[in-house]
Image (cartoon, coloured by chain):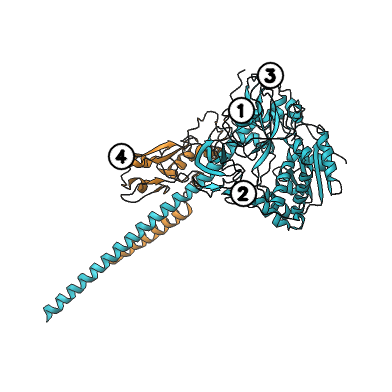
Chain colours: A orange, B cyan
Amino acid sequence: MILPAIISLTVLGVVFGLLLGLAARYFKVEGNPLVAEIEQLLPGAQCGQCGFPGCTGAAQALAEGNAPITLCPPGGRAVVLALSAKLGIEADLAGVKDVTPMMAEVKEEICIGCTRCFKVCPTDAIMGAAQQIHSVFREACTACGKCEAVCPTESIKLQPIPTTLQSWHWHKPQEVTA
Amino acid sequence: MKLFNLRGGVHPEGHKALSALHVIRELPLPKHLYLSLQQHIGAPAAPVVQVGDRVLKGQVIATAQGNVSAAIHAPTSGTITALGDWVSPHPSGLTAPTMTLASDGKEQWIETPTVADPFALAPADIAARVGAAGIVGLGGATFPAALKLNLSRNSGVQTLIMNGGECEPYLTCDNLIMRERAAQVIEGIRLIALAVEAKTVLVGIEDNKPDAIAAMQQAAKGTSVKVVSMPSMYPMGSEKQIIQVLTGNEIPAGGRPADIGVLVHNVATAYAVQQAIRFGRPLISRIITVSGGALNQPCNVEALIGTPVQELIDFAGGYRLPATRLVLGGPMMGQQFTNTQVPVLKGTSGVLALTASEVGQAEASPCIRCATCVRACPVGLLPLEMAAHIRVSDLTGAVELGLRDCIACGSCSYVCPAHIPLVHYFNYAKGDLAAQERSKLKQESTKKLAEARTERIARIERARAEAAAKRKAAREAKERAAAAAKAATEEA
């Protein structure tokens, strides 16, 4: 009595299992390949300034058309242009107000060496150790602001990157008024 | 010799007689010299002296750093009194790291290695000595000369062109050096030719300098150096244009003169090379045109590098009329400045004080698409189209039209009847593109850093989990062993 029940249930299980396995194989839903491609273009700092959970989330929203291509503050104009080329969306750069490039800077007098900032830095741009004054590598900082949020003494703050002889260039001429 | 035609070009009023009629005068020794560490294209020089050190004339005070850089030497004997920021002759008006040298008035030279027969030196040796003397291109580009010599020799340059064009209005410093020091200039030219093993040596001089042509021809007699008179036109003294006129060849877009087997040097650089090889004297002074309608006595002076511009203006008798615009270099491509404490750099060819009538500033009005700028462009670009693209921030469009081939000569701005600052648009666009390039590089590197960090955190997590698992396994083994031992004792 019990044997046919076991056999039938086993057979059913095997058959359905096989069916499910085959279905998973042949009816597989491809993830949007565009998402991966867009993610390649983004800075990858996972800073979350765009309001999406990390660069993957932002790439997903961009692929679905739910986010403007000007969403990435650390990426600047270069990323806007790259995205515009990838997605075929006209980049309205004339309308994009260029944000002043910023970087984090440690006010050394009030840094207590708590190490909180360098634990959250997504690009390892902060150097320091417990009870030591921390400092920022200008070249690695993406100005994501995570460190600013966790600093207990407001010692680390975003500051505009100072213009140097190497980085200075001519400003745009004043528009000719017709 | 057959000359080839040049496309475009303009004929600005020369104003050269203001300063060309007098001999080169020597500037009295300034009390303080301000030596910027960035006097050349490339990495800034690294100081090798301390504040308070006494230095001799010609002593190295900053060495070249990296591949593209040039050493800086003390222009006179004295004491280094400061090492810090000082106004720099840069359009931004930003300060630059600068060494201050207080002269002691003794002009005490360091021992200099003289060479009895410089033509017996090996080509590489000449280049090395030029490099040690801190010589850079004195025509204005300030590219380290030794590097250019080595690159040219390695790429098999056949033709050496010496640029005596001096097409910028007002400037007469090259004219004067060729007139008064032709023998030394020719010797320097022959040394450069030896250093790059060039077969043909041409000196191109604009025909508005007959005295210089005569002096150079006289000095070049019996040598392989050929002095050629070229029509006067702006920008004849630009590297690409002088090559085109003398050889008929055009440098491919984005290329260098060496690509077509040519090396171009300025005649003033040849003089500096001769001084460095024969007398071991580094580049510590240069000839500068001090001119403009606002000055009492425009002239050419030999000034030490680092001299504040104010001393040059005082030497030229001060102002006759109010100067509306002060310019370093020529009026077409030079840089405006306001602070007269800026020092003379190795690449400073002129100091101009221009009156309101000379500047002739007018308000810009909209483009009427007359295409005068297209006819004037010596490169064959469409300045009006490029500027229109840049105006709406379409830099890629401007690049497609050939923005990167623009030599920023200013011919288009000069002829524009609507006074549109065309060359300003191009300078802005080039700077902005370079900034974009830099930010892209930065982004790539920060992306790598972010990936490395994610990977590291994952690795640490894994290691932690493994360690925990190991500890757990060890604990369980211990417990099992303890239980087994307990069971064993109970059995016994």
Q: Are marks 2 and 4 in contact (CB under 8 Å)?
A: no
Q: Secondary structure at mark 1?
A: helix
Circle nearer the viewer, 2 or 4: 2
User: Which of marks 3 and 1 precedes in the sequence?
Assistant: 3
Q: Are marks 1 and 3 in contact (CB under 8 Å)?
A: no
CA–CA distance in space, label 1 to label 3: 29 Å
Q: Is residue A118 left or right of residue B122?
A: left
Rate crowding at label 3 as few (under 14), some (14 to 19) or many (20 or more) other CA atoms within 10 Å: few
Circle on res. A153: 4
How far across and down, in percent of the image, does residue B301 sit? 69, 34
Residue B146 at least partly seen: yes
Circle on res. B357: 3
How far across and down, in percent of the image, does residue B194 sit? 77, 53
Classify A172 as above or below B464.
above
Residue plotted at (45% across, 51% down): B451
Q: Amino acid at mark 4?
A: Thr
Chain for disc number 3: B
How far across and down, in percent of the image, does residue B396 sit? 62, 36
Classify B258 as above or below B84.
below
Circle nearer the viewer, 4 or 3: 3
Residue B237 at least partly seen: no
Q: Secondary structure at mark 2?
A: loop
Q: Amino acid at mark 3?
A: Ser
Which residue, given by chain and number where applicable, does mark 1 sit on? B391
CA–CA distance in space, label 3 to label 2: 41 Å
